[in-house]
Image (tube, grey):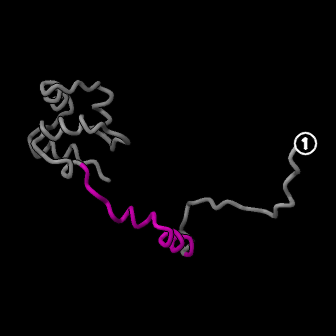
Amino acid sequence: MKWNLRVQAAERGIWKSAELRRMLADAGLEISQGKMSGLWTGTPTTIRLDDLDVICHVLGCEPTDLLVPEPEKVRARKPGARRRVEASGSTNMVAPRFGPKNDRPAPPL
């Protein structure tokens, strides 16, 4: 998913995170300066649905305006796609190596 907060804010004439933070506070959502900075500059790993609801209310948008699907990233995660990447030799993934089971030491008694 792509986080689209800054674009949605800009479309409404909001150019600074502090301005949006004040508007959210007026709507009842107190966000710390650090958390607001994270929402403004990056993609949050988590967001409370209640917070998302207030953000959408303040911006006059829908959650689908803020969370934009990226289907190409989903396709890249499929096992078949991973094999194609490995076959082309352009991978940064580390494959585990499994040796014969008899190479392992016996468990303590």
Q: Nearer the viewer, residue 16 or 28?
A: 28
Quarter placement of the C terminus = top right
Residue 98 location, x and y as percent? 74, 62
For residue 57, what is the image quadrant?
top left
Q: Residue at x 30, y 39 (%)?
A: 41
Q: Return the residue found at the far right.
A: 109
In the displayed structure, 15 sits above or below 106; it is above
**Is residue 86 part of the magenta span, yes or no?**
yes
Q: Residue at x 18, y 51 (%)?
A: 65
Q: Which residues are magenta?
A: 67-87
In the displayed structure, 54 sits above or below 74; it is above
Relative to 12, 89 lies left or right = right
Dot 1 alpha-carbon crowd within 10 angstroms: few under 14, some 14 to 19, many 20 or more: few
In the displayed structure, 87 sits above or below 32; it is below
Residue 75 location, x and y as percent? 40, 67
Q: Return the residue found at the far front.
A: 109
For mark 1, give the secondary structure.
loop
For residue 6, what is the image quadrant?
top left
Q: Residue at x 13, y 46 (%)?
A: 61
Residue picked out by circle 1 = 109
* Main secondary structure along the magenta-highlighted residues: helix
